[in-house]
C-alpha cells in the first residue's frame, strides 16, 4: 500500500516559520540554513582545491581569494560550520534520548521536555561562541 | 526501513565529521593559534604548507574520507529537505538520482586530486 501523501500547505514557510514553538525550533531552522551554506561552499571547495593536482593554487597570490570580502566570507563559512557542528551534536544527543528527561504521565498542568533540554542548547551555544571568537581572533591576526 | 537506516548513517556521518572536519577547520582557520601541520610560516594555506600536508599519506586518506563522508552527509541532508516539500514521485526520484550522480562525480574528482597531489608533493615538483 502506497504511503499517504499530504499537501504541504505552508511550503517553504514551514522551514523558517516556527510560530509559537520555542527557541529550539529556530535553532533547527538555523541548523538547516548553515548546513546549506556549508554544503554550497564545500561543493565549490572540492573543485577549487582539486586544481592543486595540476599545480594551480588559486588561493595563493594576490587574487580575489585574498580580498577582505573573501576573507570575511571564509570566516562566515567557519562560523556556519561551528554552529552547525555544535548544534548537530545536540540534535544527535536529543535523538538518542540524552538530556531530555524521563517520560512522565501527561497530568495537567502539562510539563514540556523543552525546559529539560534547554541547558544543553545553552551549553552548545556557548561552545559555538567560543569557537567563533577563536576563529575571529585567528582570522584577524593572519 | 531503508530511510531509517540511511538517516542513522546520516547522523553517524555527522558525528564523524564533527571530529574530522573539526580537525580540518582547526588546521585551516585556527592556524594562528595552533600552527598545526604548517611548518612553513604562519599561513596554513600557503603552497609550501599545502604540499607538506599533501605529502603525508594520512592526510591523503583523510581528505578522501572527509570528501566521501561530507558529501554523503551534505547531499543526503539536502535531499531530505527537498523531499519535505512533498514533490511528485517522479521529481523525488529525479532529485535522488541527480544528487547521487553529483556525489559520485565529486568523490571521483576529489579522490583523483588527492592522490595526484600526494604524488606531486612526494616528487617535489614545483607548481
Image (cartoon, helix red, strand yellow):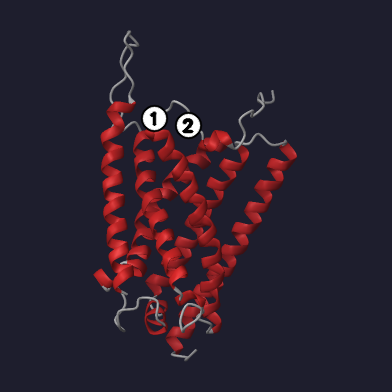
Residue at 61% across / 59% down in the picture? B104
Residue at 65% across / 47% down in the picture? B96
Q: Is residue B49 left or right of residue A126?
A: right
Mark seen at residue A22: 1
Question: Label 2 near label 1: C-beta < 8 Å?
Answer: yes
Which chain is mark 2 on? Answer: A
The residue nearer to you, when weighing A81 against B64, is A81
Q: Could you classify mark 1 by the number of other residues whose Cα lies within 10 Å: few (under 14), some (14-19), or many (20 or more)?
A: few
Residue A116 pos. (x, y %): 28, 27
Q: In the displayed structure, would residue B117 be above or below residue B101?
A: below
Mark seen at residue B24: none
Residue at 40% across / 63% down in the picture? A75
Q: Could you classify mark 2 by the number of other residues whose Cα lies within 10 Å: few (under 14), some (14-19), or many (20 or more)?
A: some
Residue A99 pos. (x, y %): 28, 32
Q: Is residue A3 left or right of residue A73?
A: right
As drawn, which residue projects farthest toward the top? A108
Residue B48 pos. (x, y %): 38, 84
Q: Is residue A118 left or right of residue B103?
A: left
Could you say whether the residue bearing mark 1 is in a helix, strand or loop?
A: loop
Which chain is mark 1 on? Answer: A
Q: In the displayed structure, would residue A70 be above or below residue A124?
A: below
Residue A38 pos. (x, y %): 48, 56
Mark seen at residue A18: 2
Amino acid at each position: 500500500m502506497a504511503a499517504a501523501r499530504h499537501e504541504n500547505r505552508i511550503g517553504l514557510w514551514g522551514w523558517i516559520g516556527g510560530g509559537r514553538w520555542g527557541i529550539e525550533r529556530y535553532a533547527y531552522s538555523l541548523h538547516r540554513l548553515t548546513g546549506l551554506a556549508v554544503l554550497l561552499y564545500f561543493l565549490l571547495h572540492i573543485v577549487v582545491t582539486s586544481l592543486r593536482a595540476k599545480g594551480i593554487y588559486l588561493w595563493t597570490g594576490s587574487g580575489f581569494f585574498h580580498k577582505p570580502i573573501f576573507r570575511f566570507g571564509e570566516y562566515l563559512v567557519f562560523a556556519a560550520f561551528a554552529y552547525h557542528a555544535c548544534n548537530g551534536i545536540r540534535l544527535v544527543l536529543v535523538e538518542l534520548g540524552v538530556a531530555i528527561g524521563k517520560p512522565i504521565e501527561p497530568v495537567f498542568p502539562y510539563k514540556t521536555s523543552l525546559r529539560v533540554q534547554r541547558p544543553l542548547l545553552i551549553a552548545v551555544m556557548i561552545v559555538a561562541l567560543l569557537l567563533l571568537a577563536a576563529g575571529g581572533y585567528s582570522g584577524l591576526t593572519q | 526501513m531503508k530511510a531509517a537506516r540511511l538517516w542513522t548513517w546520516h547522523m553517524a556521518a555527522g558525528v564523524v565529521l564533527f571530529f574530522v572536519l573539526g580537525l580540518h577547520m582547526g588546521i585551516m582557520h585556527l592556524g594562528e593559534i595552533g600552527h598545526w601541520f604548517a611548518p612553513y610560516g604562519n599561513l596554513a594555506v600557503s603552497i609550501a604548507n599545502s604540499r607538506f600536508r599533501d605529502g603525508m599519506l594520512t592526510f591523503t586518506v583523510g581528505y578522501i574520507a572527509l570528501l566521501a563522508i561530507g558529501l554523503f552527509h551534505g547531499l543526503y541532508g539536502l535531499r531530505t529537505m527537498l523531499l519535505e516539500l512533498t514533490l511528485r514521485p517522479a521529481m523525488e526520484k529525479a532529485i535522488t538520482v541527480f544528487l547521487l550522480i553529483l556525489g559520485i562525480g565529486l568523490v571521483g574528482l576529489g579522490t583523483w586530486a588527492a592522490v595526484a597531489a600526494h604524488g606531486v608533493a612526494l616528487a617535489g615538483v614545483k607548481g
